[in-house]
Image: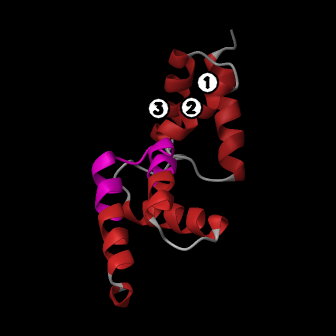
Amino acid sequence: MKGSKDALKVGAELLGVRDHSREEMKAHLMRRGFSEEESEAAADRLVELGLIKISSNDRTALQAAAREYLEKKGKVMKPSLLSSLAAYLSRKGFSEDLIEEYLEAAAEVMRDPKQE
């Protein structure tokens, strides 16, 4: 197993590429072979150091992530896209309540595009 200092270093390098939420960082580190405990400790330390700034209840970050996802997909809003968007936002570590709130608003826009 790799040491937690190594996990912290890898986490900091990942943050050099783009922002990550705590949950997203933990998942990335685990995929790179660190244990759940090492990954969690490194993610927590990165939050303490102020390097991870995206919280699970960060509305602005959620909207930016959703916008980025939708631009990549380049598709018209439809129910199946909302479902995949929900899964994406969940993997990024946003709270289920915040995701649900966002998706309800997006579904409303789908029903009445003038609300944008």
| Residue occupying image coordinates x 47% and y 46% | 87
Mark number, residue 94: none
Could you tell me the amino acid type at mark 2?
Answer: Ala
Residue 111, relative to residue 102: is it above or below? below
Residue 52, relative to residue 112: is it above or below? above
Using residue 56 as the reference point, say whether residue 92 is left or right of it.
Answer: right
Report helix, strand or loop for mark 3.
helix
The CA distance from mark 2 to mark 3 is 13 Å
- State which region is magenta: 86-102
Mark number, residue 30: 1
Mark number, residue 27: 2
Q: Is residue 88 magenta?
A: yes
The CA distance from mark 2 to mark 1 is 5 Å
The CA distance from mark 3 to mark 1 is 14 Å
Give 15 or 108, whichever is nearer the viewer: 108
Which one is earlier in the sequence, the residue at label 3 or at label 1?
Answer: 1
Q: For the residue carrying disc 2, how many other residues have a C-alpha within 10 Å: few (<14), some (14-19), or many (20+)?
A: some
Image coordinates of residue 107 in percent, x first then y, are: 35, 69
Q: Nearer the viewer, mark 3 or mark 1?
A: 1
| Residue occupying image coordinates x 51% and y 52% | 84
Looking at the image, which residue sits at the far bottom? 114
Report helix, strand or loop for mark 1.
helix
Quarter where residue 76 is shown: bottom right
Which one is earlier in the sequence, the residue at label 2 or at label 3?
Answer: 2
Looking at the image, which residue sits at the far top? 1
Could you tell me the amino acid type at mark 3?
Answer: Asp
Mark 2 vs 1: CB contact within 8 A: yes
Residue holding disc 3 = 44
Q: Nearer the viewer, mark 2 or mark 3?
A: 2
Quarter where residue 73 is shown: bottom right
| Residue occupying image coordinates x 32% and y 46% | 96
Report helix, strand or loop for mark 2.
helix
